[in-house]
Image: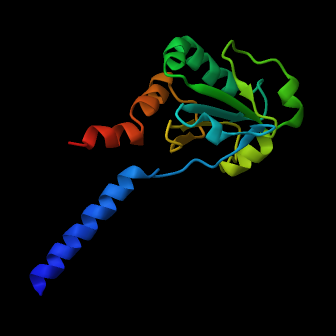
């Protein structure tokens, strides 16, 4: 009886572990960025979301500068860049960067979905839809790239025999 229970527990643990690898650990909150366009439409591509009151925000400009310095590396990974501004008039302001940001039309709602409570946030969403980073501070571009390269999906693939 005890042997059967131990074997049964081992089997259940193995099944649970294999299912955990097939799922997203921390799904990123979905958002729309235009008519009929959602975060899910970018599945398979890493998404970098910057949330700020406006493109004039010093943290937004600083983060954009850090990304701009290595933009080609992000482009080679098919990264998508989204700017969500909480000030409704900010969407019409020029961006301080040559990065092809998608400007979300509902920045305040996106900010609320991601628990934005400050002046700035940088969010990295993996190709699998996993929320890999949500920081209220400007992040080095190399750390963002590490998040893209070492996302949960990639780590799970490397663990397989």
Please provide percent x and percent y for residue 55: 76, 25
User: Which is nearer the eye, 125 or 89?
Assistant: 125
Q: Residue at x 58, y 47 (%)?
A: 28
Q: Is 155 situated left or right of 143 in this image?
A: left
* Colouring convention used in this rendered image of the protein: rainbow
Please provide percent x and percent y for residue 52: 73, 34
User: Which is nearer the eye, 61 or 151?
Assistant: 151
Q: Is 121 situated left or right of 18 in this image?
A: right
Vertical side of 142 occupied by 16: above or below: below
Vertical side of 129 occupied by 99: above or below: above
Q: Residue at x 45, y 23 (%)?
A: 142
On-image quarter of the N terminus: bottom left
Q: Is 35 situated left or right of 145 in this image?
A: right
Q: Residue at x 74, y 35 (%)?
A: 84
Please provide percent x and percent y for residue 137: 58, 35
Please identify the quarter of the rendering in which residue 66 is found: top right
Please identify the quarter of the rendering in which residue 49 is found: top right
């Amino acid at each position: 009886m005890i042997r059967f229970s131990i074997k049964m527990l081992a089997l259940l643990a193995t099944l649970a572990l294999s299912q955990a690898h097939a799922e997203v650990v921390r799904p990123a909150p979905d958002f729309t960025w235009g008519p009929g366009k959602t975060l899910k439409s970018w599945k398979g591509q890493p998404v970098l979301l910057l949330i700020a009151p406006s493109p004039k925000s010093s943290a937004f400009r600083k983060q954009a500068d850090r990304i701009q310095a290595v933009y080609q590396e992000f482009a080679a990974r098919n990264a998508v860049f989204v700017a969500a501004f909480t000030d409704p008039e900010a969407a019409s302001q020029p961006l301080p960067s040559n990065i092809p940001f998608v400007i979300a039309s509902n920045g305040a709602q996106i900010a609320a979905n991601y628990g934005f409570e400050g002046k700035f946030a940088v969010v990295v969403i993996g190709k699998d839809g996993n929320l890999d980073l949500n920081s209220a501070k400007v992040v080095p571009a190399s750390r963002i790239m590490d998040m893209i390269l070492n996302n949960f999906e990639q780590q799970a693939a490397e663990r397989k025999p």
